[in-house]
Amino acid sequence: MRWRYLLWPFSLLYLLIVSLRNTLFDWGFLKQQTFDTPLIVIGNLNIGGSGKTPMTSYLIDLFSKHQKKIAVLSRGYKRKSKGFLWAAPAQNVQTMGDEPWMLYTKYDGAIDIAVCEKRTKAIPIMQKKKPPFQAIFLDDAFQHRYVKGTCSIILTPFHKPFFKDHMLPAGDLREPASGLKRANVVVVTKCPSHVPAEIMEQYTQRIQSYHNVPVWFSGYRYGSFQPIGEPKEMKNDIVLLTGIADAQPLVNYLKSQPIQMKAHLAFPDHYQYKLSDILRAIKLCQQHQATLLTTEKDLAKLIAFKTHFKEVSAFFIPITIHFLKDGTKFDDKIMSYVENIII
C-alpha cells in the first residue's frame, strides 16, 4: 500500500520513542524482573500474522511429549474482562480472548492457560500452583520487557521478513530490527513447501547481520477437514470464512486442492463475529450449495453460533507447524533452556 509511505514522519517519531524505551531497559533505568520458572517467549518484531499461535501449539506438543508440566500466559487480546483469569469451563472466548480460548478447547482443558494484562503480576500467581510448572510460555511478549525471558523465539514470515519491513505506521514493525539482539532463536514461518538452499542461506545471512542467532525455516501442514457440530457431507464447493491476520497461505493451499472456493468472507484478525456475519455466510453456502469452511482459530469464536450451522455443512481445518530441515535440532535447542543445558 503505497499510501503508507506518506506516514514516514510518524514512523520516525515512533522509532525514536521505541528506541528510547529499549535504551532505558538496556541501561537499567527501567527494571526487568527475572523468575525461577523458565519462561519461553514467543514473539515477533512485526504486528500480527507471523504464526505465534501455531508455534505455541507446537511447543505445547513438544513439551508434553517430554512430560513437562507447562502453562501458557497471554494478554488475552480484545477480551471483555480484566485482571488475571485461569481458563476454565465457566469462561469463554469473550472473557479469555480468541487465541487462549482456542488453545484451551483444542487441548480439552488439559493445558493450564491464563490471561492477564500484566505478566509481572500473573507469573507469581502461576508459580504458586502445585505441582510447579517446569516452563511457562509467554505468548506475544517480546516487547513486554518488564519480564526477562529465559528463551525468546522470534517469528518472521517468509513472504515479509522483518528485514524487508519498516516501522509503524509506514510499515508493520513494532520495533527496529536491532531489537533482534534480544532473541535466542529465529524461525522463518509460512515458508512454501520447498525453499532452495541458496534462498535459506540469503535469509540466514540477512538475519544474522543483525544478531548471530540460530535460524530455522518452517511451514504449515493442513490437516483433514473436521466437522463443526453434527457431521455432514463435505462438498466440493466451499465458502471460506476467516478472521485471521494472514489468510493467504490457507487460500493458496485450498487452490491446490480438488475443491472450488465460491466466496471468501475475510475479516480482520481477532474479529468478533456477529450473528449477521454468520447468517451472511450461511446464505452464501445455500446459494452455492457449498460447505462452510473456517480455521481452527476462528472456530473458538464461532462455537457460540453452532446451532445455526445445522442449516449447512460446516467444517474447520487444523494446521500444524513443520520444519523444512533440522527440526529435531530446534526441539533440542528449546528443551535445553528448560534443562539448563544451553547448546
Image (cartoon, grey):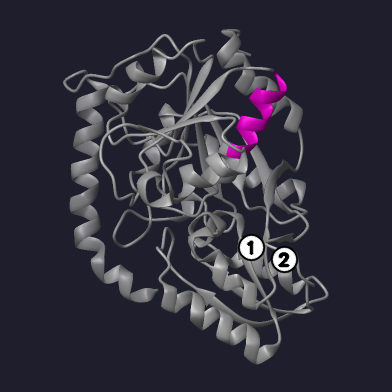
**What span is in magenta?**
57-66
Residue 274 placement (x, y as % from top left):
40, 71
Q: Which mark is residue 253?
A: 2
Work out which residue is located at the far bottom of the displayed protein and give it. 287
Looking at the picture, tell me which residue is in the foreground, 33 or 260. Answer: 260
Residue 105 sits in which quadrant? top right
Q: Secondary structure at mark 2?
A: helix
Let me know if residue 240 appears in the view. yes
Residue 58 included in the magenta stretch of the image: yes
Amino acid type, mark 2: Tyr
Residue 86 placement (x, y as % from top left):
41, 31
Looking at the picture, tell me which residue is in the foreground, 34 or 217. Answer: 34
Amino acid type, mark 1: Pro
CB-based contact (under 8 Å), mark 2 and mark 1? yes
Residue 178 included in the magenta stretch of the image: no
Q: Residue at x 53, y 39 (%)?
A: 104
Relative vertical location of residue 151 with respect to residue 239 in this rendering, above or below: above
